[in-house]
Amino acid sequence: MSKEKVFQLKPLLSVLIIVVSLFSLAFFQMEERRLGYNLLKLNRDHREKLEQKRSLEVQLAKITKPQLLDQVAQSRLTLKKLQSNQIIHLSGPIKFNSKKEDL
């Protein structure tokens, strides 16, 4: 190529570089905004899931309350309260080894 042709192409290349730079800058800003919206949506979903988990834990605590379980056992399952003469002790005599070898 001659110097004259290169000299004629320099302004075109400069404009082309500027246009490509501006388009890539706009693309990166749009991509940053899109990722920000995705992050916002994920944070909102996370908060909703945490609230749902807390709600389920409270519901589980209410359901498994000993008084409620006792009431359900007596009303629906026809179980009766335990009396002291109904308790059976299955443990036998306790043996202690005082030998140091067993330790």
Image (spheres, rainbow, N blue to C red):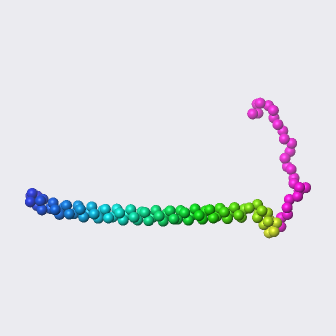
Q: Quadrant of residue 71?
A: bottom right
Q: Is residue 52 left or right of residue 60?
A: left
Q: Quadrant of residue 37?
A: bottom left
Dominant secondary-structure state across the stretch colored magenta: loop
Quadrant of the snapshot with the C terminus: top right
Question: Residue at point 81% right, 32% down?
Answer: 98
Question: Residue at point 29% right, 64% down?
Answer: 23
Q: Quadrant of residue 35?
A: bottom left
Task: List x then y, in percent, for residue 59.
Answer: 67, 65
Reply above or below: 94 against 11: above
Give the farthest residue toward the bottom.
76
Question: Residue at point 86% right, 45% down?
Answer: 92
Task: List x then y, in percent, for residue 12.
Answer: 17, 63
The residues colored magenta run 78-103
Give the farthest residue toward the right.
85
Q: How many marks?
A: 0
Reply above or below: 26 against 87: below
Quadrant of the snapshot with the N terminus: bottom left
Front residue (pair 59, 93): 59
Q: Is residue 90 magenta?
A: yes
Q: Is residue 40 left or right of residue 69?
A: left
Task: List x then y, in percent, for residue 7.
Answer: 12, 59
Give the farthest residue toward the top.
100
Task: List x then y, in percent, for residue 96.
Answer: 82, 37
Front residue (pair 59, 2): 59
